Structures are given as structure tokens and as C-alpha cells.
Amino acid sequence: MAPKKRVTHQDVARAAGVSTAVVSYVVNNGPRPTSHDVRERVLKAISDLGYHPNAVARGLRSRRTNTIGYIVNDYSSMDVFLSSYNAQVLTGLTAELKAREHYVLVYPMDVGEDVGSLERLLNSSRLDGLVIRLVDETPETDALLERIAATRLPCVCIEQAGAVRFGFSAVIYDDRRGSYDATSYLISRGHRRIGHLCGDRRYVTARARLAGYRAALTDHGLPIDDALIYGNDWNPEAAHAAVMHMLGLHAPPTAMVVASDDLALKAIETLHMHNIRVPDDMAVIGFDDIPAGRNANPPLTTMRIPLVDLGQHAADLLLEMIQAEDSTAMNRIELLPVELVRRGTA
């Protein structure tokens, strides 16, 4: 059987009794208006014939590709495909873009990686705009954002904002405040020996969560004991050594603020292995609110970052800028709330 011939816009024009230019005006919503009757005839012909406009050709005419780049600038950028944190951000970003007929191109990029291949992508005319996840802050991110700014592509930063001079919008959250609130909550529950299991301190996030923990102790008149601060890794396996360290202290803590849910879940597993009851013997609070924490036994008390909302807000901001056809239009910083979710571990 011979392959079915592809329907063209000339076929639509003949069926609707209009010129090919009018078909283009209807498909592209301009640049010239069409009457209601003509538009309905063209749309009927498109439906009857099963016509699908050539996206590449439309993109060339409109200078739009409906494709958004999601750059993950991280010390372990390929974790974008593995971590629950990134999965939730991508869920929000992709869902919002898909609902508005846009696509996502994911570009993992390690911190310090040569920018040559990224520059080729940015200058390829394949992208309408960018969302970039930053785990560092200015001035460390300035060189990368300088390259992006030179392309004049609309850009929204997430997790960390770029330097003000770039004028990029950003969607961020307050790690320091979240950790402060977690520690304060444990203090309000009567705990006075509270440990902190740190994440990788190369990340602003890990340093800010440590700073919030320290500030809460100080503000509540409690001493900061460095022996209660342990760890420098996001790998959940690091939690085992941290828990063993805490349990080996002359005066072990009665509670822990843990820098991520993944670390917290592993810490609880280790505590259970040593017959330490959670929360009766050791209260534990995580950070992020990933699905695994909600489904754990007992369910994990945590500081919730609205990660899906973060992706959705980033998409909204970026599409506003693209619609305005101005890479610096409506630039703003959105600060999302970090909230304590009380469950079974604290």
C-alpha cells in the first residue's frame, strides 16, 4: 500500500475556497485579520483533512519555537533525572508549559563546566527562553549569566537569584528561615540538645540551612555545640555516619534538624536499626517534602518547599516575558513560603 500523502496548506486552501495566505493568517492568528465566516471555513477544512501545520516553518515565520530550555547548573547536574527534588520542579515546569503548548529541553550543566556547547545551544535559535536552576549565588554565577544575558533570551532563575544587574526574574525560597523555624519548633517541644545533619556545604542551600539552625539556637538562648553539627553531603548514605556520630556523643541529641528529606529518611532508618524510637527517643525534621517522606512509616515531619509551584511560577514568569517580546519585561523576584508540615517524626 502506498504511503498516505501528507496534507498541505494548499490542500486546505482549495477545500476552503481561499488563498494559501488566508490559511496562514488563520493558522498563525495573523498578521492580517480574517472574517468569522472565512475563519470557520478554514478551520473546518483543517479538521476534515487532518492538516497539521509544519512547526518548523511556523517557527521560522514567527521567530518562535515554543521550546524552553531548562538549564540545571549543579555540582551533580545529571541528578536532574534522579532526584525527587528535581522531579517535582520539572513536573510543575513541564505541566504549565505543556498546558500552553510549549516544550522543554533539559540541559544538565556541571558548575565550572566549559560553556562552549551551551553557547552553541543559546545561539542556535532553538529556544524562546530559559529557566535556570542555580545552586550558587553572585558573584560565582556572574560569568554564566553574563553569557546568557548576551543572547537577550528571556531568562528566569530558580532556587537562587542572579545578580541584580542582569535583570532576570527569579523564583526562590528562604532556606535559612525554614531551618530556623524547624529548630524553633523543636525547642518549643522541649528539646535542648538538637543536632543538625548538613548537606553539601558547597551549596548555598546547605549553608543557609545551617545558618538558620545556628540562629535559632542563639535566639532561644541555647549554646551552639559544634559536636552536634555533622555532615557535608547530599548523598543519603552519608546520614548513617552522621547518626552514628550523634549516638556516640557523651550527651547525644534528642532531636535532629536534617538538611533534606532523603537524608532524614536514611537517618531514621539507621535510628530504627539501633532500636532508637522516632520520635519518642529522637525527633527528626527533614526539609523539602518529597513524596517518599509523606509515605514513610512514620510519615516524615518536614519543612515543605512548594517545589511543583516553583516550576509553575517559573514557567508563568518566563511566558509573560516571551509574550511581551522583551527579555527584561516584568522582571521580579517571587519568594515562595517554606512551611512546617507536622507528621509523625517530631
Image (spheres, rainbow, N blue to C red):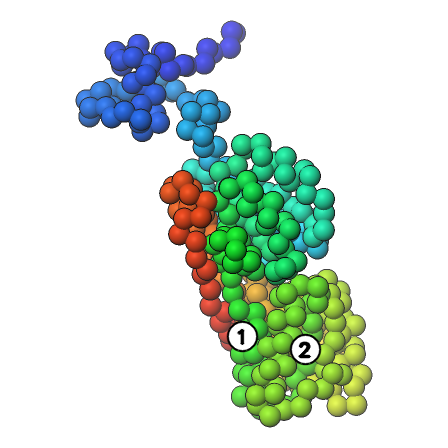
Q: Which mark is residue 287?
A: none
Q: Earlier in the sequence, mark 1 or mark 2?
A: 1
For the C terminus, the quadrant is bottom right
* Residue plotted at (61% across, 86% down): 217
Q: Horizontal and vertical percent for residue 55?
A: 46, 26
Give the quadrant of residue 54.
Answer: top left
Q: Determine which residue is flagged by label 2.
A: 196
Q: Name which residue type carries label 2.
A: His
Q: Name the side, left or right, on which 34 lies relative to 146.
A: left
Relative placement, left or right, of 289 versus 200 is left
Kindly identify the residue that appears in the image at 36 percent across and 11 percent down. Answer: 11
Total labels: the figure holds 2
Given the image, on which type of amino acid does mark 1 rest?
Arg
Question: What's the distance in space between the residues labelled 1 and 2, CA to CA?
Answer: 15 Å
- Is residue 103 positioned above or below 291 on the image? above
Q: Does dot 2 land on a helix, a strand or a loop?
A: strand
Query: In the rendered view, does 122 fall on the left or right side of 240?
Result: left
Label 1 close to label 2 by CB (< 8 Å): no
Residue 197 visible from this viewpoint: yes
Between 248 and 214, the one nearer to me in the picture: 214
Please tell me whether residue 31 is drawn above or below residue 198 in the rendered image. above
Q: Dot 1, how many residues are within 10 Å of its Cα: few (below 14), some (14-19), or many (20+)?
A: many
The image shows residue 209, relative to residue 141, as above or below, that is: below
Residue extending farthest to the front is 165
Decide: few, some or many residues near mark 2? Use Cα within 10 Å; few <14, some 14-19, many ≥20: many
Q: Which residue is nearer to you in this view: 200 or 82?
A: 200
For this orientation, the residue located farthest to the top is: 2
- Look at mark 1 in the image and give the residue it sits on: 177
Estimate the x, y position of residue 51 in percent, counting from the top left: 39, 20
Where residue 84 sits, quadrant-wise, is: bottom right
